Image (cartoon, rainbow, N blue to C red):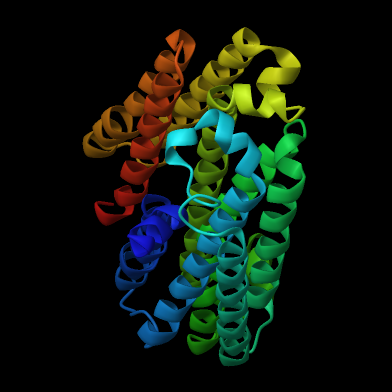
Amino acid sequence: MKILHFIRLLRPINLAVIVLTMYVLRYFLLAKLFAAKGFELRDANFEFGMLILATVLIAGAGNIINDYFDLRTDRINKPHRLIVGRHIKRRVAMAAHFLMTVAALCIGTWLSWYMRSFSIIFFFLLAISALWSYSASFKRKLIIGNVVIAVLSGIIPFLVGFFELPGQMLRLGSDPRELFTVLERMPSEIDLMFLGAWVWILVYAGFAFLSTLIREIQKDIADLKGDRAMKATTVPIFFGVDRTRYIVMILTLIMVSILISFQKTFIPDPFSFWYIVVGVALPMLIGGIITMRATKRSQHLLASNFIKLSMAIAICYAMFI
């Protein structure tokens, strides 16, 4: 039973989304972009698996430390789902956080040596520091905590890009440092391929950032009671629940508008239209509508699940491009 409670503490669904994101971006999106020009991914499957493992360890450790600092709040918001302090001792949770973080840093150090670049370990250190600061302080401050988690979600696609693209560029005779100056000279097909890959990485990162920001603000409404007891200054506490509902809906409409505009401009085929409209935009809108009408915590959690569904379907789009 202790193991099951520890697995719940890690939030396995959220970790699975991270694994899915990284796997799909490398083995479908980037692989297809390279295959279109007759190239293959680098032979680095083991190393990429270690990158995924380290990222999951950092995210899992972040979930643990979040519950560690949120003990008093969770006793109010979700007493029946309390894990730290009830099923797992606080010192055990802290020890698990420490061990997972150290393991991730060791993997990150090795990957940085393998890649001859400090980009991965830099992102890891940034994420670890941000997750600790979020749990200890930022979460209870106006918008800062929401933005921190949204930025960390947006970094995940870039981890895939920095792992695969610079090494691939050097292998194919292109200079990573000069990639974004291609418009100032006559770009080669290889340059354009890599530039397109970075654009797709940026698109996925932007979607991850905005959808996570929406979900984090929406979750603050669900956690209002406990946050208020802890004298936090979250968006619904500062602006009020009704105004926050409109903020969530406006951000949702902005997201949907960007998605449809991007589809019509850059990938104007019928399959992409229906995939994005029905699979991605519709669940986002349903989540926004439920948020507008929700009166119970369970309804807000349902809205959050629709946003999660939209995010998962958007990630899988790379499998069908």
Disc tally is 0
Given residues 195 and 298, the one toward you in this image is 298
Q: Is residue 305 left or right of residue 142?
A: left
- Quadrant housing residue 114: bottom right
Residue 23, x across and y down, in percent: 36, 65
| Pick the front one: 210 or 304 | 304
Q: Give the percent coordinates (x, y) of residue 284.
A: 40, 27
The residue depicted at 37 percent of the width and 33 percent of the height is 305
- Horizontal placement of 201 versus 149: left or right? left
Q: Quadrant of the N terminus?
A: bottom left
On the picture, is 149 further left or further right than 265?
A: right
Classify residue 165 as left or right of residue 132.
left
Vertically, is 117 above or below 156? Answer: below
Q: Position of residue 315 (x, y in %)?
A: 36, 49
Q: Is residue 213 visible?
A: no
Residue 81, picture quadrant? top left
The relative height of residue 268 versus residue 157 in the rendered view (above or below) is above
Q: What residue do we see at 48% from left, 24% from top?
A: 257
Residue 189 showing in the rendered view: yes
- Depth check: give the residue in front, 41 or 224: 224
Q: Position of residue 180 (x, y in %)?
A: 66, 64
Which residue: 69% across, 80% down? 118
- Residue at x 57% of width, y 43% of height: 209
- 199 in relation to 264, above or below: below
